[in-house]
Amino acid sequence: MDLKLEVIVLPVSDVDQAKNFYETAGFRLDVDNTFSDDYRLVHFTPPGSQCSIIFGKGMISTAPGTAQGLYLIVPDVEQARAELVERGIEVSEVFHDAGGLLHHGHEDGDAVHRDAGQQRIPGPEPHRTSYASYATFRDPDGNGWVLQEITERQPGR
């Protein structure tokens, strides 16, 4: 049986502000429907992705900005960062982890992850190893996105 992740629901406080942000970021607007005064659905798909995001009014009870660690996989993290910055999105500088591990500390200065041996080192991973270079950005509510460079997949993917 195939199980395909297709949609992630994002908690936002201002639907129009979020819609503008994701349009600016270059996500494709698939749906914007208002069903009632209490229910509006906005659906976007990142370029090249098979998984989409939805947000709106009356969709989720989670506090705005609490979705974190949303990974966007890119073949060139520096190019992806530059394109987002050119579109007006504030993106961190490219970094890699001091331990060479999958980066879990999405926040700068996150003591829990720093104590676990994770530290952001400026620039892409020196050998441009897949899964090892990152940049981060947030939507207006603080939902956190991670650009991760992958040029070669692990076996079985």
Image (spheres, rainbow, N blue to C red):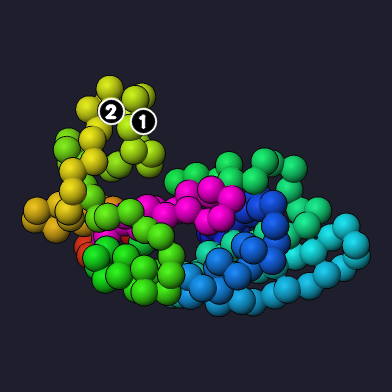
Q: Quadrant of residue 43?
A: bottom right
The residue tagged 1 is: 110
Query: What type is the residue that disc 2 sits on?
Result: Arg
Question: Which quadrant is the N terminus positioned in?
Answer: bottom right
Say if residue 35 shows up in the picture. yes
Q: Are marks 1 and 2 in contact (CB under 8 Å)?
A: yes
At label 1, counting other C-alpha atoms closer than 10 Å, the crowd grade (few under 14, some 14-19, many 20 or more) is few
> Which residue is drawn at the image coordinates 48% and 70% (left, top)?
25
Q: Is residue 86 left or right of residue 54?
A: left
Question: Which quadrant is the C terminus positioned in?
Answer: bottom left
Query: What type is the residue that disc 1 sits on?
Result: Asp
Q: Position of residue 85 (x, y in %)?
A: 36, 68
Q: Position of residue 4 (x, y in %)?
A: 54, 59
At label 2, counting other C-alpha atoms closer than 10 Å, the crowd grade (few under 14, some 14-19, many 20 or more) is some
Q: Which mark is residue 114?
A: 2
Dominant SS type (magenta):
strand
The magenta segment is 135-150
Q: Is residue 148 magenta?
A: yes
Of helix, strand and loop, which one carries label 1?
Answer: loop
Q: Position of residue 79 (x, y in %)?
A: 26, 71
Does 115 appear above or below 22? Answer: above
Q: Quadrant of residue 35?
A: bottom right
> Which residue is drawn at the image coordinates 70% and 61% (left, top)?
15
> Which residue is drawn at the image coordinates 33% and 54% (left, top)?
92
Say if residue 45 shows up in the picture. no
